[in-house]
Amino acid sequence: MAENRKAALVRITGRVQGVCFRVWTHDEAKRLGLCGWVRNERDGSVTALIAGPEGAVGTMLQRFWEGPPGASVSTVASEDASSIEAPRDFRIAK
């Protein structure tokens, strides 16, 4: 039986820009087989849409708390995003 699919819209705050957070997110998401996107926001946060198997989404949500070297994550807030269509791959959005 296939694992349930899940999608989450995630906002990560802290020192998350200027530390390759988007590239790190892209690489981690690809490793986990997730689809979606990641982008920097004007307020200094990072937003990501992650979609895929429920277990992989859960793992990515946990990894957001670590981030790449140099990052200092303050919050990881996620909400259900099942109504948002995710791309078939994972990309860095502008």
Image (cartoon, grey):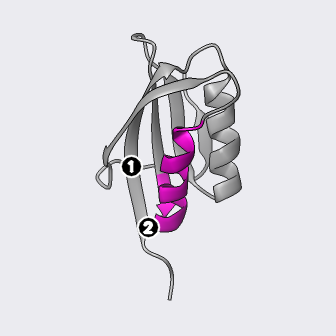
Q: Which residue is rendered at x = 34% and y = 47% of the image? A: 84
Instruction: Give the side of residue 54 with respect to residue 34, left or right.
Output: left
| Membership of 61 in magenta stretch | yes
Looking at the image, is 35 positioned above or below residue 14? below
Query: Mark 1 Cα within 10 Å, few/some/many (few <14, many 20+)?
Result: many
Residue that extends furthest to the bottom in the rendered view of this protein: 1
Looking at the picture, how far across and down is residue 54, in whole percent? 46, 66
Element assignment for label 2:
strand
Nearer to us in this view, 28 or 65? 65
Looking at the image, is 80 positioned above or below residue 92? below
Q: Quadrant of the C terminus?
A: top right
Q: Where is mark 2, residue-wise? A: 5
Query: Mark 2 Cα within 10 Å, few/some/many (few <14, many 20+)?
Result: few
Looking at the picture, how far across and down is residue 68, in whole percent? 67, 31
Q: Main secondary structure of the magenta part?
A: helix
- Residue 87 visible? The answer is no
Q: Which residue is rendered at x = 55% and y = 28% of the image? A: 93
Looking at the image, is 4 positioned above or below residue 89? below
| Membership of 57 in magenta stretch | yes
Looking at the picture, how far across and down is residue 30, in whole percent? 68, 50
Instruction: Give the side of residue 68 with respect to residue 2, left or right.
Output: right
- Residue 13 visible? The answer is yes
| Label 1–label 2 contact, CB within 8 A | no
Looking at the image, is 54 positioned above or below residue 21? below
Numbered tag placed on residue 8 in the rendering: 1
Element assignment for label 1:
strand
Nearer to us in this view, 33 or 24? 24
Real-space Cα separation, disc 1 to disc 2, in angstroms: 10 Å
Q: Which residue is rendered at x = 40% and y = 54% of the image? A: 7
Numbered tag placed on residue 23 in the rendering: none
Of the residues shown, which amino acid type is indicated by label 2?
Answer: Arg
Magenta span of residues: 51-66
